Amino acid sequence: MALSRGSRAARMLLVALVSFAVAACGAGKPEVARVGDRDIAEADLRHAAALQHVLADLQGTPCGGQPLAGETADAACDRAALSGELIWLAVSPYAEAHDITAGQSAEDAVVQLETQVGGAEELRRSLSARGLTRDDLLELGRKILMIRAVRTAIAEERIGGDELRSQYEDRLVEFTTVEANHILLATRAEAEDVYRRVRDATRAQFAAIAREESTEPGADESGGDLGSSPATQFVPEFANAVAALEPGEVSRPVRSQFGWHVIYLADKQVTPFEEVKDGLLEPLADQEFRGWLEERASELGVEVNPRYGRFSAQTFSVQPARSTDPSDATVPERDAGSPSP
């Protein structure tokens, strides 16, 4: 029985809708990977991998590190490059929203690399061999420095200024430089007696008594002068005691493995909190940043085309696709981390 004109039109519409749905499904799959609404195409990956190859060639190391079991060297390089691109796409919106800029110049980093590899011409040849330019390397440098700046900002945000300042106060001796004299004695009784004599002494008076009483070799000439040095250069008992003094003060007797000390502090310099804050933050930054990235992975819905591996939210990196061979069922995971110039 022939279809009516209305039935034929309905069938054609149905076929068109099915075709559109199939096409839409195909279009929804990322060519390489997707972070939120931003895609990484094959051309993007080839560009990123070429840069990784250049850096590896210059440093004499495998691109992306040693390949894992059953993986080619090119696949390992692609994974490292892709992992870096995924991190960048996760980080860049945060940097834009918080007006974060890289503190160090990418130009400075590239100049340093040129020096390390034998000059600008050597670097140019290496880049040209991979179809790249110095501007491509500068752009990678900017991305890396921005990732590091965001990493620091996120760690500071999650840890909090109060916690960092508390660490600073607890470790103040590490940031203190002192100029001091001391008198070394064998017993506490002797040290107490000397302390009573010098507790209100000037530095010259203290040095004179040190020449008479100190058992330290050479004290008869030096007057117990220790010069200026970081407090941490001394044994902990001495370091803590001298760092607790103010210039012009004399300590009560302090015992160490060398005997009993009476200390005169001539000068003290303490590095301000703002100057050491980044150093306090650095050992904690990786853990905090990785925690933030894992949260972002869930929020963004990161997708990786299986032909390039599988995405690990825990490490925010691309891992080799697991083999269907039972004997190869435990391919170890490895952090790709941030790319480095």
Image (cartoon, helix red, strand yellow):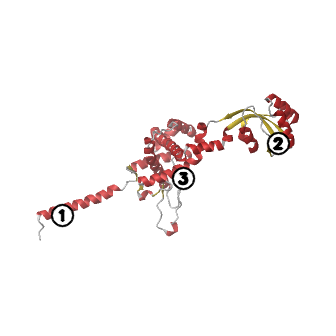
Q: Return the x and y of residue 139 as percentages of the image width and height.
A: 46, 40
Question: Can you identify the residue that label 1 sits on?
Answer: 11
Q: Is residue 119 visible?
A: no
Asked if marks 1 and 3 touch (Cβ < 8 Å), the reply is no
Q: Amino acid at mark 3?
A: Gly
Q: How far is mark 1 from mark 3, CA to CA?
A: 56 Å
Which is more N-terminal, label 3 or label 2? 3
Between residue 318 and residue 328, name the one nearer to us: 318
Q: Return the x and y of residue 307 as percentages of the image width and height.
A: 42, 58
Between residue 312 and residue 341, name the one nearer to us: 312
Density class for disc 2 (Cα within 10 Å; few <14, some 14-19, many ≥20) is many
Q: Amino acid at mark 1?
A: Arg
Q: Is residue 160 visible?
A: yes
Residue drawn at point x = 60 percent, y = 37 percent: 275
Q: Return the x and y of residue 200 as percentages of the image width and height.
A: 80, 31
Residue 280: quadrant of the picture: top right
Between residue 286 and residue 133, name the one nearer to us: 286
Answer left or right for 218 relative to 17.
Answer: right
Does 193 sit above or below residue 330?
A: above
Answer left or right for 305 relative to 314.
Answer: left
- Which mark, residue 260? 2
Residue drawn at point x = 39 percent, y = 51 percent: 36
Does 275 sit above or below residue 8?
A: above
Question: Can you identify the residue that label 3 sits on?
Answer: 65
Q: Amino acid at mark 2?
A: Trp
Which is more N-terminal, label 3 or label 1? 1
Which image quarter is the N terminus in? Answer: bottom left
Density class for disc 1 (Cα within 10 Å; few <14, some 14-19, many ≥20) is few
Tally the numbered discs: 3
Pair 2/1: label in front: 2
Answer left or right for 15 relative to 261.
Answer: left
Per the image, label 1 sits on a secondary structure element best described as helix
